[in-house]
Image: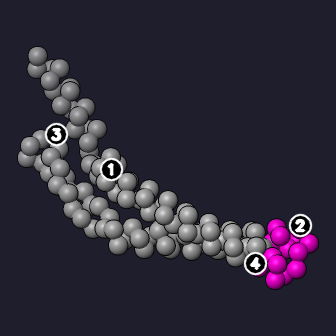
């Protein structure tokens, strides 16, 4: 993972943000697609065998073709999506007392005007 250092409200505070490496994104993409395509294969096989009254070999052929095409197309789409989100810093860091500190600063400023 890559680390980015971004300045926070105070110039003395630095937040560390972790970014996924391209290798991690590729591995996440492949494992996700294997599971999702396996589910698609099973659904198409059951549908074509039970509801279209096809033989088992025809059902496996239909399910295999659809699963392979779906695997390849969605693999590319998911990888692009993952890399775009990897570059977006929004939501990658969270400070535990962020809102409490802001409320106290606001109250302090208001009381000392």
Q: Quick one: which residue is furthest to the right in this view?
A: 53
Q: Is residue 75 left or right of residue 44?
A: left
Quadrant of the rendered structure where residue 69 is? bottom right
Q: Quick one: which residue is furthest to the left in this view?
A: 12
Q: Position of residue 31 (x, y in %)?
A: 50, 74
Q: Which mark is residue 9?
A: 3
Determine which residue is flagged by label 2. 51
Which element type, helix, strand or loop, lies under badge 3?
Answer: loop
Who's the residue at 32% across and 64% down the image?
A: 20
Is disc 1 surrounded by few (<14), some (14 to 19) or many (20+) residues within 10 Å?
few
Start and end of the magenta stretch? 46-60
Which element type, helix, strand or loop, lies under badge 1?
Answer: loop
Q: Is residue 18 above or below residue 113?
A: below
Who's the residue at 56% across and 64% down the image?
A: 73
Which element type, helix, strand or loop, lies under badge 4?
Answer: helix
Q: Earlier in the sequence, mark 4 or mark 3?
A: 3
Q: Disc 4 to disc 3, how far (Cα)?
A: 59 Å
Who's the residue at 26% across and 45% down the image?
A: 97
Determine which residue is flagged by label 1. 88
Front one among 10 and 82: 82
Q: Disc 1 to disc 4, how far (Cα)?
A: 41 Å
């Amino acid at each position: 993972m890559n680390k980015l250092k971004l300045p926070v409200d105070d110039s003395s505070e630095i937040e560390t943000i972790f970014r996924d490496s391209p290798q991690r994104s590729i591995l996440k993409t492949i494992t996700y697609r294997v599971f999702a395509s396996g589910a698609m294969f099973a659904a198409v096989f059951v549908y074509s065998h039970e509801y279209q009254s096809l033989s088992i070999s025809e059902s496996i052929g239909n399910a295999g073709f659809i699963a392979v095409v779906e695997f390849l197309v969605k693999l590319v789409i998911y990888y692009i999506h993952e890399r775009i989100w990897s570059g977006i810093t929004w939501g990658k860091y969270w400070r535990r007392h962020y809102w409490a500190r802001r409320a106290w600063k606001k109250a302090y400023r208001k009381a000392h005007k």
